[in-house]
Image: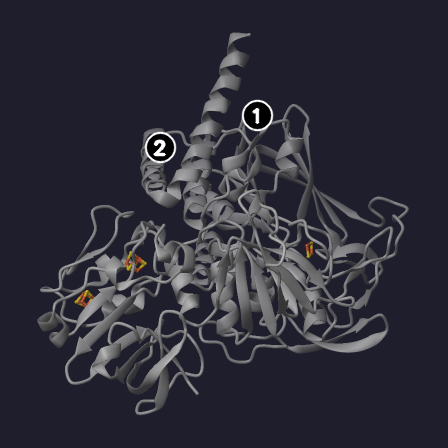
């Protein structure tokens, strides 16, 4: 299951350690997550559904879906996909009951900061880098390392040189992290922000679960850059272990060097699905085919061409009807769709595969921003529910900002630009003499964004942004008038 | 709808191809037919043979300026550029990001844009780098078809 040699990534595994899974002693490497260690040991069922006890594997792989909850060292409901394995860890099936006390034996720590940034992906890191020149910055991320989803992007980025085109996502993550570490930024890793409270000032509660620490954070301004999560798709058998979010598979394979299986089926020929297919091939995993419901390929032609010339078929106008298998995926039935999106009878194909990746889009992770009272609206082009915001990324709740995929499903390159804008705008009042300089920089980043959103693939995000801005100004205008 | 939009396979009629003389000296064939925000190929070219109106426009190549150096192959994130040189035999340089890398002199299979085996090929050069570039030799009639290799 472990990838030893890879054309792009060099897996630097840590020390070999041991842990216990339901009483059995297993091997792992330091630096990998519990879920990755279990997967490498062939354990793919991590939890059971609460009512019917149906088996569950990981799905999102990035801490957002809770399908990997287990009990670790007596602590229940640990998201094993983002929690590092440690020597001697005792990993067990989760109890099916709620714990009695909310924070048993927890330390409470109070923090005070000018700017709190929630999320250390491309948007959050960029915001932190810009803001740190003018204010105290606290950066919080629930993963054990910074970089967000860049850390699994092994392909070279598009765009212009300024936005690091031609550089691989993993390298961009490294560059951003180095820059953040050079500045005076306080970083909390392994820490999830779980609540926002308006106490006349902005107040966050965050927990580092494994260290039983609760942080109470008073912040002058907050930038939320919580990213997005993989969409589910409705089909028979979609909860079988072996049905994974595309991003989860990328994390397992590209970050931890563990193969998801032998033969994969990918649903969705957008860029995520196309890139994932290529990455699977690079990890020496077979790709049976890609199915795409739309009549044409949604992602870049060049990504499609790369995998076509490796012999992977793309079936447009097709979708997955059913996944089958006993406690784990053993295959799938795909079929053609008519104009009304109904399956055409008799067009079914049986595809033998041992895992299925869903690459059917992302939705902004709005659970936290929704707690702030910022206005939220469903905007189809933005990928779902988003917080309304203005050109400076400030929401309808003053002092609360959004950036990146949370603010509209887009690219890492645009997330970085939005993060920079949010980071700079949030610190204007802290920067005594540099206000004009900051505004000039913001203007420059806005122009870069504008250029990015031209062209065919910029149409959707551009429409989304324009709607979000318009609705923001309508709301704020009404508020001012009343 | 064009075939490449549905199948991910570009047809020669969708490309602006070089003339025979240009092919004899060896030039870059840019199989990038869709407007995407991308331009590293423009920056990489030492002779300014590739131009673009704006970052979303299609790259345009001046085959007279192109010297077939292959610098653009390595930087193209779409792996969409190939250098083709046709004399008695055709030499094709292509990006190859898989392991193991072939060895110089090794016999491999040449694949077309659909991944189908079309002919035998001999590996003439392996240039390691961030994106390795492999140069293969195939019969001249496959110059515009062979776009990948399979190591048997
Ligand atoms: S092969 Fe060399 S000269 Fe020709 S377009 Fe590419 S970089 Fe320019
Ligand atoms: S670098 Fe490659 S993908 Fe980008 S515009 Fe040039 S040819 Fe197209
Ligand atoms: S939260 Fe761990 S797999 Fe989704």
Nearest the camera: B111 or B95?
B111
Q: Which residue is found at the position 67% from the left and 60% from the top?
A: A243
Residue A227 visible somewhere in the drawing = no
Judge left or right: residue A425 versus residue A335: left
Residue pointed to by mark 2: A434
Residue pointed to by mark 1: A397
Which residue sits furthest front?
Answer: A346
Element type where label 2 sits in the image: loop
Residue A336 visible somewhere in the drawing = yes
- Mark 1 Cα shell of 10 Å, populated few (<14), some (14-19), many (≥20): some
Nearest the camera: A196 or A257?
A257
Judge left or right: residue A346 versus residue A241: left
Nearest the camera: A89 or A382?
A382
Q: Position of residue A379 (x, y in %)?
A: 54, 32
Distance from Cα at disc 2 to Cα at disc 1: 25 Å
Discs 2 and 1 carry the same chain letter: yes
Query: Which quarter of the rendered image does ligand 2 occupy?
Result: bottom left
Can you say whether A139 is above or below A319 in the image?
Answer: above
* Chain of the residue that carries numbered disc 2 in the rendered image: A
Q: Position of residue A200 (x, y in %)?
A: 65, 23
Judge left or right: residue A354 versus residue A481: right
Quadrant where the N terminus of chain A lies?
bottom right
Quadrant where the C terminus of chain A lies?
top right
Element type where label 1 sits in the image: loop
Q: Point out the tag, 2 or 1, that comes first from the N-terminus.
A: 1
Q: Which residue is found at the position 25% from the left and 72% from the top?
A: B144
Q: Position of residue A317 (x, y in %)?
A: 51, 53
Confirm if mark 1 falls within 8 A of ligand 3.
Answer: no
Q: Nearer the viewer, mark 2 or mark 1?
A: 1
| Picture colour scheme | one colour
Can you say whether A318 is above or below A467 in the image?
Answer: below
């Amino acid at each position: 299951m472990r990838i030893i040699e890879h054309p792009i990534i060099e897996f630097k595994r840590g020390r070999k350690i041991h842990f216990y899974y339901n009483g059995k002693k297993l091997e792992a490497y330091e630096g990998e997550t519990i879920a990755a260690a279990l997967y490498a040991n062939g354990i793919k069922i991590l939890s059971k559904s609460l009512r019917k006890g149906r088996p569950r594997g990981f799905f999102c792989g990035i801490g957002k879906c809770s399908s990997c909850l287990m009990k670790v060292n007596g602590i229940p409901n640990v998201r094993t996909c983002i929690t590092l394995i440690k020597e001697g860890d005792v990993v067990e099936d989760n109890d099916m009951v709620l714990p009695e006390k909310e924070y048993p034996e927890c330390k409470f720590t109070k923090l005070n900061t000018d700017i709190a940034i929630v999320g250390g992906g491309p948007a959050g890191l960029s915001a932190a880098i810009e803001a740190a020149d003018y204010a105290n910055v606290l950066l919080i991320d629930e993963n054990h390392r910074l970089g967000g989803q860049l850390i699994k992007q092994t392909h070279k980025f598009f765009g212009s040189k300024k936005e690091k085109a031609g550089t691989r996502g993993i390298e961009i993550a490294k560059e951003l992290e180095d820059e953040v570490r050079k500045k005076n930024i306080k970083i909390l890793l392994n820490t999830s922000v779980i609540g926002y409270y308006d106490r006349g000032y902005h107040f966050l509660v965050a927990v580092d679960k494994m260290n039983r620490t609760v942080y109470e954070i008073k912040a002058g301004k907050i930038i939320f850059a919580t990213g997005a999560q993989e969409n589910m798709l409705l089909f028979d058998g979609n909860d079988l272990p072996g049905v994974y979010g595309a991003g989860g598979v990328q994390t397992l394979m590209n970050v931890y060097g563990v193969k998801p299986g032998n033969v994969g089926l990918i649903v969705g020929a957008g860029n995520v699905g196309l890139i994932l297919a290529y990455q699977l091939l690079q990890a020496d995993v077979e790709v049976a085919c890609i199915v795409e419901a739309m009549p044409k390929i949604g992602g870049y032609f060049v990504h499609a061409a790369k995998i076509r010339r490796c012999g992977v078929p793309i079936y447009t106008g097709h979708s997955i009807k059913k996944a089958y298998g006993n406690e784990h995926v053993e295959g799938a039935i795909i079929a053609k769709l008519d104009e009304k999106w109904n399956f055409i009878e008799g067009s079914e194909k049986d595809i033998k595969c041992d895992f299925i990746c869903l690459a059917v889009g992302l939705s902004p992770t709005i659970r936290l921003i929704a707690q702030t009272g910022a206005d939220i609206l469903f905007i189809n082009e933005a990928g779902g529910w988003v917080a309304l915001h203005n050109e400076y990324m400030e929401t309808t709740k003053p002092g609360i900002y959004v950036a990146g995929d949370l603010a509209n499903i887009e690219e890492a390159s645009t997330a970085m630009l939005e993060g920079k804008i949010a980071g700079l705008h949030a610190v204007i009042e802290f920067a005594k003499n540099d206000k004009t300089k900051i505004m000039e920089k913001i203007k420059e980043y806005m122009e870069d964004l504008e250029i990015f959103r031209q062209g065919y693939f910029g149409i959707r995000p551009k429409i989304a942004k324009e709607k979000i801005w318009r609705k923001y100004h309508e709301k704020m205008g009404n508020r001012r008038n009343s | 709808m064009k075939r490449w939009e549905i199948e991910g396979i570009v047809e020669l009629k969708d490309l602006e191809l070089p003339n025979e003389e240009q092919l004899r000296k060896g030039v870059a064939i840019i199989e990038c037919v869709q407007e995407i925000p991308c331009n590293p190929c423009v920056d990489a070219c030492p002779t300014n043979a590739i131009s673009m109106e704006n970052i979303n426009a299609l790259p345009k190549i001046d085959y007279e300026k192109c010297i077939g150096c292959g610098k653009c192959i390595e930087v193209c994130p779409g792996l969409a550029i190939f250098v083709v040189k046709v004399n008695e035999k055709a030499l094709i340089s292509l990006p190859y990001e898989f392991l193991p890398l072939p060895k110089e002199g090794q016999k491999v299979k040449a694949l077309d844009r659909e991944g189908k085996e079309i002919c035998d090929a001999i590996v003439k050069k392996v240039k390691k780098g961030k994106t390795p570039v492999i140069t293969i030799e195939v019969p001249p009639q496959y110059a515009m078809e062979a776009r990948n290799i399979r190591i048997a």
